Amino acid sequence: MTFATDVLALLLDPKTFFADSSKTSSLKLPVLFTAIYAVVVAVVSAQASAASAEMLGLGSMTGMMQGIGAVSGLIMTFISWLVVALVFFVFIKFIAHTQSGFKPFLIATGYASLPLLIGAVLTLIVDMIAKGTFDGWMGFVLNLVILLWCIPIWAYGCAAAGNVPVSAVFTAILIPIILMIAFTAWGTYTNLEAMNNLQTGGLQVSMGPQR
């Protein structure tokens, strides 16, 4: 397969993609996808940090907050990959009784960075055209769609990595996926509440008695 064919198979037909056992033996593509995704996340995080600085009236600290946001986004992308791989590995180990080690699962879950990358790029482009489109619950819906896109990649990838049935993998990763959705929904809700509180506070200050 060519690289382009591999990418299309991964995105549209992960069952066929992972039928090739070599796909779970090399970290090259997962690291490449995750590294590019991490850079895009760093850019998005820097922009979000700059917007937060302006909202909080910390314009003089915008540059520093952008840097912190970018570095944090970059590092957290790789940490998230490791955490997801480890959680899936533990659940599949106990539920599907795989005899495989951790590395194939790290590789398999890393491939999901490709749809995550597509979602991050889409967010970046749309935000440049219509700022704030994916703020709040619209962002949650986009994240949910991307998560659903990742599920077949995780399922077939982990099944190949652990040499276990796909149905067993679906059962094993169901709880972690539900927790991911719940965590994302809670994060969206708390962010919206924080934004509303900031805006309400700013409105109260602006409407207060003038001296």
Image (cartoon, rainbow, N blue to C red):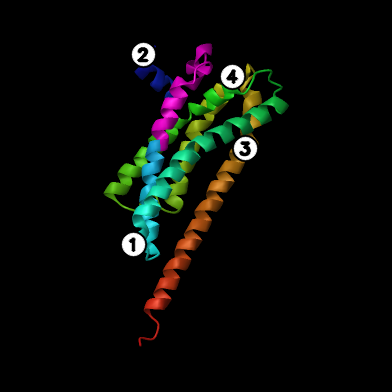
Q: Compared to 204, does 113 lie above or below?
A: above
Q: Are marks 1 and 2 in contact (CB under 8 Å)?
A: no
Mark 4–mark 3 distance (CA, rounded to whole Å): 18 Å
* Residue, disc 4: 161
Q: Earlier in the sequence, mark 2 or mark 3?
A: 2
Q: Amino acid at mark 3?
A: Pro
How many numbered discs, if any? 4
Label 4 environment density (alpha carbons within 10 Å; few <14, some 14–19, many ≥20): many
Kind of element beneath mark 1: helix
Residue 160 location (% of width, % of height): 58, 18
Q: Residue at x 69, y 23 (%)?
A: 96
Q: Residue at x 40, y 45 (%)?
A: 70
Residue 76 location (% of width, % of height): 50, 41
Residue 61 visible in image: yes
Kind of element beneath mark 2: loop
- Depth check, mark 3 against mark 1: the one in front is 1
Q: Residue at x 42, y 49 (%)?
A: 68
Mark 4–mark 1 distance (CA, rounded to whole Å): 48 Å
For the record, the magenta segment spans 13-38
Q: Quadrant of the N terminus?
A: top left
Which one is in front, 39 or 137?
Answer: 39
Looking at the image, the residue that sits furthest to the left is 129
Q: Which mark is residue 59?
A: 1
- Depth check, mark 1 against mark 2: the one in front is 1
* Residue, disc 3: 176
Label 1 environment density (alpha carbons within 10 Å; few <14, some 14–19, many ≥20): some
Q: Earlier in the sequence, mark 4 or mark 3?
A: 4
